[in-house]
Amino acid sequence: MVDMIFYEEVIDAFKFIFSDYRVFFQIGAVLLVISLIRRLLFYDYYADIYMSVILLIFSELMLYIEVGYCSYISLYTLKGRDYLPHLIINKKLFFEGLKKSFAVYIYTIIILFLESFKTLHFNNNNLGAICIYVAIILVYSMMVLGLMNRFLNHGSFFQTFNIKGMYTIFKNIRIKNFLLVLICVFFAQFSVAQCIFPFKSDSFFLNILLVVFPFFISPAVLIFTKRFVALHIRQLFEDSAYSYKLE
């Protein structure tokens, strides 16, 4: 029964990718613009400092819009809606992306601090390095649980750091289910990170692929993972104490 549910969730998420071509290409266009601007700025193709700052701010604002929209995909699915929300740029969408992005930034800073601490103090100490890696995995897991808790509490920023809420959610999830959610979240974040911190290559063919990635691959990965994880969470919590929050 569980395998059948999992199979149905995967098929549903794949079909959902192209359920609205207009939205798919809108997401791709936003990510492509972000990627091109970052590529322009990070690799010294643009020298004017003032225009560089303006472009960087513009790309950051577009990022918040994209992150906010992806949150809406998850929220619509949790509420039982089987269609992609329209990408309408407004204040609510922007602030949703801003809140979620800053929550992720805080956890990312902690992870980067732990990584730097490992490099400085445990570079030649295998046991110490393993402990730091365990701590990093724990912090990343807390971030994912915090984001889940946030969705189940009306998008509250502070619920992303509510330890009690995280623990309650974790008790309702089997380890293998949670690992699946972790993997999906990682791929979703990687697809966005590739646009924010674009790779550089001397190969013309590879550079073309790196431009195609944010326009075609990234939106597909984002829509699939957001839909799949939200379907999975809805299924997991359907008969739990959180079921009323899914309506």
Image: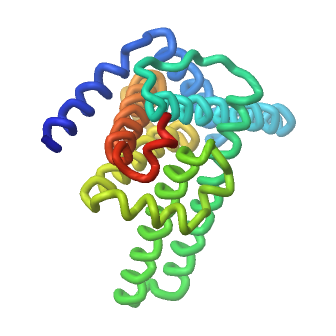
Let me know if residue 204 appears in the view.
Answer: no
Pick out the residue farthest to the right.
50
Residue at x 43%, y 10% (from the top left corner): 21
Q: State the residue in front, 98 or 92.
A: 92
**Could you tell me residue 9's position as x and y percent?**
26, 33
**Could you tell me residue 187's position as x and y percent?**
39, 44
Is the residue 70 above or below the residue 179 in the image?
Answer: above
Q: State the residue in front, 173 or 7.
A: 173
**Quarter where residue 80 is shown:** top left
Q: On the rendered image, what quadrant is the N terminus found in?
A: top left
Q: State the residue in front, 61 or 79.
A: 79
Total of numbered circles in the picture? 0
Is the residue 12 above or below the residue 109 in the image?
Answer: above
Residue at x 40%, y 62% (from the top left corner): 170
In the image: residue 184, left or right of residue 154: left
Residue at x 58%, y 40% (from the top left corner): 196
In the image: residue 92, left or right of residue 153: right
The colour style of the image is: rainbow
Is the residue 171 above or below the residue 10 in the image?
Answer: below
**Quarter where residue 92 is shown:** top right
Let me know if residue 240 appears in the view.
Answer: yes
**Quarter where residue 243 is shown:** top left
Residue at x 23%, y 26% (from the top left corner): 11
